[in-house]
Image: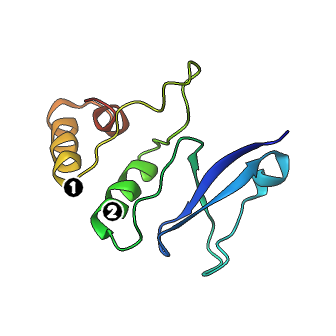
């Protein structure tokens, strides 16, 4: 049975479940805008489409290289900031200390 994972289109603010296999390596496209979908992970839950701030947070996380894959023990992807204020605080911490942005964003 192929593994299914969430792919998102940040421009359209939609997510889709797709199989993750070799055919997917060439990339899935959004059926609305035809842009490439971004792999978000199997533990991803999309925010409401009207919640622009949550989608902005999601954009920062995905572009920083973080995703929402299940850990090997099934306990989820770990901490992820949920508000723009948390994202700003963690990015300021990363700039101040030299810690990589992905690590700062994943730290509670």
Quarter of the image with the N terminus in it: top right
Q: Which residue: 30% across, 38% down? A: 105
Q: Which image quadrant is residue 15 in? A: bottom right
Where is residue 59 shown, x and y percent of the image?
A: 40, 58
Mark 1 Cα shell of 10 Å, populated few (<14), some (14-19), many (≥20): some
| Residue under pointer 2 | 56
Tag shown at residue 84: 1
Mark 2 Cα shell of 10 Å, populated few (<14), some (14-19), many (≥20): some
Left or right relative to 86: residue 27: right
Quarter of the image with the C terminus in it: top left
Where is residue 55 shown, x and y percent of the image?
A: 37, 63
Helix, strand or loop under label 2: helix
Q: Which residue: 71% across, 63% down? A: 28
Q: Tell me if residue 12 comes above or below residue 25 in the rendering.
A: below
Q: How many marks?
A: 2
Q: Tell me if residue 15 comes above or below residue 20 in the rendering.
A: below
Evaluate if marks 2 and 1 touch, with contact meaning CB atoms under 8 Å apart: yes
């Amino acid at each position: 049975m192929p593994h299914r994972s969430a792919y998102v289109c940040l421009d359209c603010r939609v997510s889709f479940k797709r199989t993750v296999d070799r055919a997917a390596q060439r990339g899935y496209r959004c059926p609305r805008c035809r842009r490439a979908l971004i792999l978000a992970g199997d533990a991803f839950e999309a925010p409401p489409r009207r919640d622009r701030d949550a989608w902005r947070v999601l954009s920062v996380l995905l572009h920083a290289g973080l995703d929402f894959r299940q850990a090997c023990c099934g306990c989820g992807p770990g901490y992820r900031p949920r508000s723009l204020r948390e994202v700003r605080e963690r990015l300021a911490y990363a700039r101040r200390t030299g810690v990589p942005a992905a690590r700062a964003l994943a730290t509670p």
